[in-house]
Image: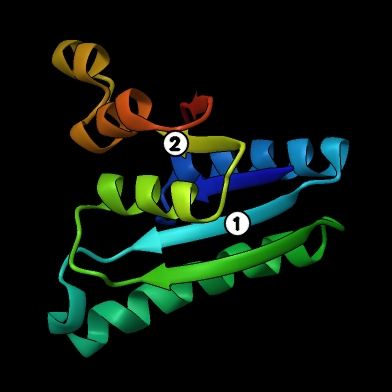
């Protein structure tokens, strides 16, 4: 089994990572932790470094969890939702975990454009987690 977490360091994505880690242990799954940078090759060095630090934070958490994982920092010039879906298809992912933070009335309906896109286009089940 393969599990994917869209991770950006937010409180919601940390909760998604925790839940995905638990599922990974339960099902002896490989856990992919991915962050997507929309700018592609035009990303600024400080933005790349920030994304690397975010993934290091995820690695530090997962190292103590006893799960098999891989991290990916993608900068393919795609919107994060499209990047996650493409990654899921390319790697035959079985389940996606996402943190969602939209709490306004409109946000509750729309979930945010990235989350909404992933929920509608994912090739597998998607679990959303709120902070």
The label nearer to you, 2 versus 1, is 1
Task: Give above or below for 105 relative to 114.
Answer: above
How packed is label 1: few (under 14 Cα within 10 Å), some, or many (20 or more)?
Answer: many
Which image quadrant is residue 15 in? top right
Q: Residue at x 75, y 35 (%)?
A: 23
Q: Is residue 40 visible?
A: yes
Task: Give above or below for 37 relative to 1.
Answer: below
Which quadrant: the N terminus?
A: top right
**Which residue in the protein does label 2 denote?**
99
Q: Nearer the viewer, residue 124 or 13?
A: 124
Q: Earlier in the sequence, mark 2 or mark 1?
A: 1
Task: Give above or below for 128 relative to 54.
Answer: above
Q: Please tell me whether mark 1 sits on a helix, a strand or a loop.
A: strand
Q: Residue at x 45, y 32 (%)?
A: 123
Q: Nearer the viewer, residue 115 or 62?
A: 115
Q: Residue at x 48, y 47 (%)?
A: 88
Residue 39, position as x, y percentages in the image = 15, 70
| Residue placed furthest toward the bottom | 45
Q: Please tell me whether mark 2 sits on a helix, a strand or a loop.
A: strand
Residue contact at pointers 2 and 1, CB within 8 angstroms: no
Q: CA distance from mark 2 to mark 1?
A: 15 Å
Q: Which mark is residue 32?
A: 1
């Amino acid at each position: 089994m393969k599990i994917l977490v869209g991770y950006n360091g937010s409180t919601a994505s940390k909760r998604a990572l925790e839940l995905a880690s638990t599922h990974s242990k339960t099902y002896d799954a490989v856990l992919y932790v991915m962050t997507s940078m929309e700018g592609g090759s035009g990303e600024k060095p400080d933005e790349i470094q920030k994304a690397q630090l975010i993934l290091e934070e995820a690695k530090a958490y997962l190292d103590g969890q006893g799960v098999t994982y891989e991290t990916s920092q993608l900068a393919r010039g795609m919107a994060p939702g499209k990047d996650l879906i493409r990654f899921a298809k390319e790697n035959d992912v079985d389940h996606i975990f996402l943190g969602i933070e939209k709490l306004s009335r409109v946000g509750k309906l729309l979930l945010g454009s990235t989350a909404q896109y992933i929920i509608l286009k994912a090739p597998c089940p998607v679990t959303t987690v709120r902070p």
